[in-house]
Image (tube, rainbow, N blue to C red):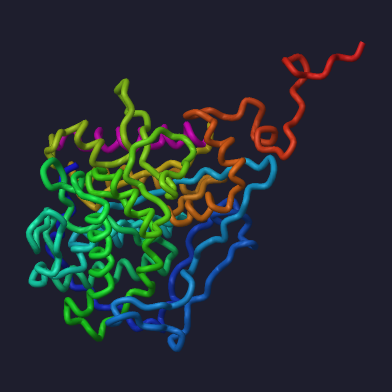
């Protein structure tokens, strides 16, 4: 995967008013069926924003403890015989706000469609170019980065979006820093200790952005990043084996750096494996990874602006592939659908249009929960391990033969008459 998360020209966004205004965020995470992300709205646990007097600055004031995150639904264990919700996760690699304003746009798309998402922030997007020497990338010279750095205006814009996203119930993960890919000294060659160092630096740049930009009077990010950061996606999906070991030792809860089929997740090295998945690729006999970059490579190669005459078709192809994968799970095994994207206008922005249309098509459907990875991991942790084991036994698109009530009942329902195992017919 090429390094593509470059920050473009910026538009100055004024810093948000102080943390006392945190109460003004919109509600997300429910749908038109009258249920919240995990159950009836009446059972949702809503955390009220902390009053200004309860805000506790952390370190140099770049981050702050402001209480529990608002708009996080309480995970509930499935009842015997209950059909699982259809979870869908939309996630963004290298999240940052630039002149395209895609971060802010998709925040609004999420709110309008009862969704929350995961934003994998690149740490160097919180570090101004003139301070690039503070970044000490593994196996590279100080201040190196394949995606560049940011400037004060771009950092202010990104901080604004991160703040609002979190207050709306979205998750802030990490895409690490310099996005080094390929052979040689790319992330695929990094040791466990080097991954730990890279992760610590990604956190540090978030925790010191005010010092590094000189914006000491700006409002803080309203979360403790030591607690907020629970998962990641590695650059180019490389280096996963050693990262998993590092992540496990650092106490992270999930990873989304792999490739999987549309089946229920399991844990690897103590972390939930929430990998992106293979879905149908309309017009082809092979399946495609649920990521905009991979659709692009299989359509226009590495040319990010291919034949304009094909842009609409390529976007439709991605949209329809994701929707086919969604329907396959929704009607089948109900495995969570994991989708990954970038804030990029590749091929005329056709993939952004495709993702938006998928959000609009699926997130307000009955029994669908468009959630962040944090919310999905919370729900998985709340389930009976025996139930999850049963769910993992279902293949791609495979619905329980005798229905969900029988499949997940406390006591399996008797087999229907006339099939093996059914009670003998009375004379």
Check the image and name the residue furthest to the bottom: 53
Residue 113 horizontal side relative to residue 124, left or right: right
- Specify whether residue 31 is in view: no
Residue 244 lies, in percent from the top left, at 34, 48
Residue at x 22% of width, y 73% of height: 156
Q: Nearer the viewer, residue 118 or 116?
A: 118
Q: Main secondary structure of the magenta part?
A: helix
Q: Nearer the viewer, residue 343 or 223?
A: 223
Above-or-below relation of 156 to 396: below
Residue 152 horizontal side relative to residue 50, left or right: left
Check the image and name the residue furthest to the right: 427
Q: Nearer the viewer, residue 425 or 203?
A: 203
Residue at x 69% of width, y 33% of height: 406
Above-or-below relation of 250 to 63: above
Question: Total of numbered circles in the picture?
Answer: 0
Quadrant where the N terminus sits is: top left
Residue 34 lies, in percent from the top left, at 60, 55
Quarter of the rendering containing residue 220: bottom left
Q: Which residues are magenta?
A: 308-331
Residue 391 lies, in percent from the top left, at 56, 36
Residue 293 horizontal side relative to residue 183, left or right: right
Task: Report if residue 317 lies within the magenta region.
Answer: yes
Quadrant where the C terminus sits is: top right
Task: Report if residue 29 lies within the magenta region.
Answer: no
Residue at x 29% of width, y 22% of height: 284
Residue 120 lies, in percent from the top left, at 30, 56
- Specify whether residue 170 is in view: yes
Above-or-below relation of 195 to 277: below
Residue at x 30% of width, y 62% of height: 104
């Amino acid at each position: 995967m090429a390094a593509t998360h470059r920050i473009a020209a910026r538009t100055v966004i004024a810093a948000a008013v102080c943390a006392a205004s945190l109460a003004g965020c919109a509600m997300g995470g429910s749908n038109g069926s009258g249920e919240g992300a995990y159950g009836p709205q009446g059972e949702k646990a809503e955390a009220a924003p902390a009053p200004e007097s309860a805000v506790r600055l952390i370190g140099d004031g770049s981050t702050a403890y402001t209480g529990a995150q608002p708009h996080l639904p309480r995970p509930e264990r499935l009842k015997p015989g209950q059909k699982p919700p259809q979870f869908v996760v939309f996630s963004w690699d290298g999240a940052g706000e630039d002149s395209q304003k895609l971060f802010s746009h998709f925040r609004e798309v999420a709110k309008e469609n009862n969704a929350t998402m995961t934003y994998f922030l690149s740490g160097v997007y919180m570090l101004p170019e003139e301070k690039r020497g503070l970044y000490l990338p593994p196996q590279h010279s100080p201040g190196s980065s394949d995606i560049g750095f940011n400037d004060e205006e771009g950092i202010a814009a990104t901080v604004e979006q991160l703040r609002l996203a979190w207050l709306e119930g979205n998750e802030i993960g990490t895409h690490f820093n310099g996005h080094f890919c390929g052979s040689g000294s790319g992330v695929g060659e990094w040791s466990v200790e080097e991954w730990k160092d890279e992760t610590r630096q990604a956190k540090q740049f978030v925790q010191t952005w005010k010092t590094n930009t000189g914006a000491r009077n700006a409002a803080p990010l309203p979360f403790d990043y030591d607690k907020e950061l629970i998962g990641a996606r590695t650059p180019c999906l490389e280096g996963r084996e050693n990262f998993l070991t590092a992540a496990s030792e650092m106490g992270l809860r999930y990873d989304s750096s792999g490739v999987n089929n549309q089946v229920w997740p399991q844990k690897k090295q103590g972390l939930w494996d929430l990998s992106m998945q293979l879905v149908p690729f309309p017009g082809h006999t092979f399946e495609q990874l649920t990521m905009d970059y991979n659709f692009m490579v299989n359509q226009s190669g590495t040319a990010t602006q291919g034949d304009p005459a094909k842009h609409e078709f390529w976007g439709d192809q991605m949209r329809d592939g994701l929707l086919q994968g969604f329907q396959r799970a929704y009607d089948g095994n109900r495995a969570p659908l994991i989708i990954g994207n970038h804030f990029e206008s590749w091929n005329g922005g056709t993939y952004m249009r495709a993702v938006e249309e998928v959000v609009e098509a699926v997130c307000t459907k009955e029994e669908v929960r468009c959630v962040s990875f944090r919310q999905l991991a919370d729900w998985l942790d709340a389930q009976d391990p025996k139930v999850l084991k049963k769910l993992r036994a279902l293949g791609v698109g495979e619905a329980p033969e005798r229905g969900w009530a029988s499949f997940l009942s406390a006591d399996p329902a008797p087999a229907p008459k006339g099939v093996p195992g059914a009670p003998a017919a009375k004379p």
